[in-house]
Amino acid sequence: MTQNFFQTFILLLLVTDPFGNVPLFATALNPVPPSRRPRIVIRECMIAFVVLLIFMFFGRHFLQALQLSEASLRIAGSVILLLIAIRMIFPHPDGVLGRNEGGEPFIVPLAIPALAGPSALATVLLFSRDSTGEVLIHVAALAAVVVVWLAVFLGAERLQKVLGPQVMTAFERLMGLILAAMSIEMLLGGIREFVKTL
């Protein structure tokens, strides 16, 4: 149970990539008065949490309605994860999630897609096929990840100043490498499931 919780926690942490999203949060909150920034961070994190929670609990019904197999979802999710991991390792001028327009952020781009993006949604959809006990472990892991989000983003400006851009970039690339390995493992699992149905 502890191992399952830890694995889920690490996977969700890598998929949502809070440390890699620090520059995005810092840029998006730059035009906002400092007194309002903590409220916006908390609001956006809670919105992302609720969205992921909805997908976690109703993901199975979503799959059935669209007549999607678990193998196809696993393979599709792994491809998305791999693409994001590649952009984390080899930075793009527009960032991992594309361009971000100015102004006070609301839902987009911080809650969605920075935190509750396609890869995170695909990941929690996979959790919905598990037993009730396992889903509760996943919910606890997601809640723990939200605590990390809040800690990272509320201290984002201070973190950037202390660590510096080079350390932040190196950390993001390391997370990208780990995420790439996890996406390949996820892809192989999906292929194994598909082969069993033949």
Image (cartoon, rainbow, N blue to C red):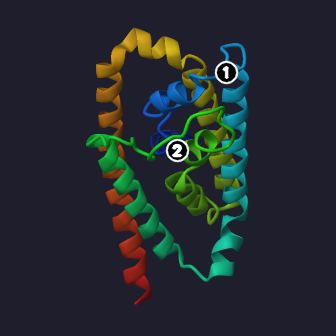
Is 94 rendered above or below residue 51? above
Is 76 rendered above or below residue 91? below
Tell me the crowding category of disc 1: few under 14, some 14 to 19, or many 20 or more residues within 10 angstroms, Cα based: many
Q: Nearer the viewer, residue 3 or 102?
A: 102
Residue bearing the label numbered 1: 37
Q: Earlier in the sequence, mark 1 or mark 2?
A: 2
Q: Position of residue 10 (x, y in %)?
A: 47, 40
Is 181 rendered above or below residue 171? below
- How many marks are shown on the rendered structure? 2
Q: Nearer the viewer, residue 20 or 184?
A: 20
Is 111 rendered above or below residue 53? above
The amino acid at mark 2 is Leu
Locate residue 171 relative to residue 32 in the image: left or right: left
Are the two marked residues, 1 and 2, in contact with CB atoms closer than 8 angstroms? no
Tell me the crowding category of disc 2: few under 14, some 14 to 19, or many 20 or more residues within 10 angstroms, Cα based: many
- The outermost residue toward the bottom is 198
Q: Residue at x 47, y 15 (%)?
A: 159
Residue bearing the label numbered 2: 12
Foreground mark, 1 or 2, reads 1
Quadrant containing the C terminus is: bottom left
Quadrant containing the N terminus is: top right
Q: Nearer the viewer, residue 160 or 72?
A: 160
Locate residue 55 relative to residue 194 in the image: left or right: right
Q: Residue at x 52, y 20 (%)?
A: 156
